[in-house]
Image (cartoon, rainbow, N blue to C red):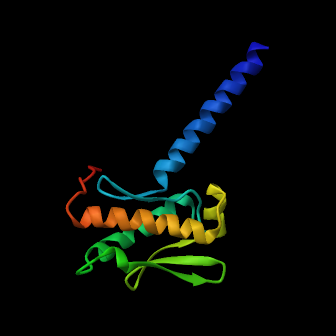
Amino acid sequence: MFKNISVLVALSLIGTAAYASSQSEGQIAEGSVFLLQLHVGQGNMTLKQRADVVQERLPDILGMPGLSPSDVHDVKQGNQYNIMVGSHLLVTCTAADAKVNNVSVQKQAMMWMDSLKKGLMEVKSGGAVPVSK
């Protein structure tokens, strides 16, 4: 009986650690400013690889002169939404992304865009505190 409980506790702890790891692993931020949270990989990319690609796109976006919330928009492509900042692709919102939050792909894209608009403006106004690596 105690052996079964110990196994269940161990599995629960492993699952909790894996979830916490995937949350931080898929977090997109600039310094201390949260921008959005990815929960799944895309295509042949793991969650970490996808987050790294998105993170690598930020410097060009943040360097845009006159960056404003109106620069953040979506472009529907099939059953996906490309989240754009000006002419720069930041991330593609897929059905798998929406499924995590039990919403439509369009709703998930809108949630990400709202978060991005707030976060990017905070970064541009100097609100980002660099995170040491």
> Percent x, y for residue 80?
61, 77
Q: Nearer the viewer, residue 104 or 23?
A: 104
Can residue 43 be seen by looking at this rendering?
no
Can residue 50 be seen by looking at this rendering?
yes
* Left or right: 125, with 96 as reference point: left
* Left or right: 86, with 104 as reference point: left
Q: Nearer the viewer, residue 43 or 119?
A: 119
* Residue found at x 34% / y 62%: 119
Name the quadrant containing residue 28. bottom left
> Percent x, y for residue 118?
35, 63
Q: Nearer the viewer, residue 19 or 101?
A: 101
Name the quadrant containing residue 92. bottom right
Label tally:
0
> Percent x, y for residue 19?
57, 44
* Left or right: 76, with 24 as reference point: right
For this orientation, the residue located farthest to the left is 126
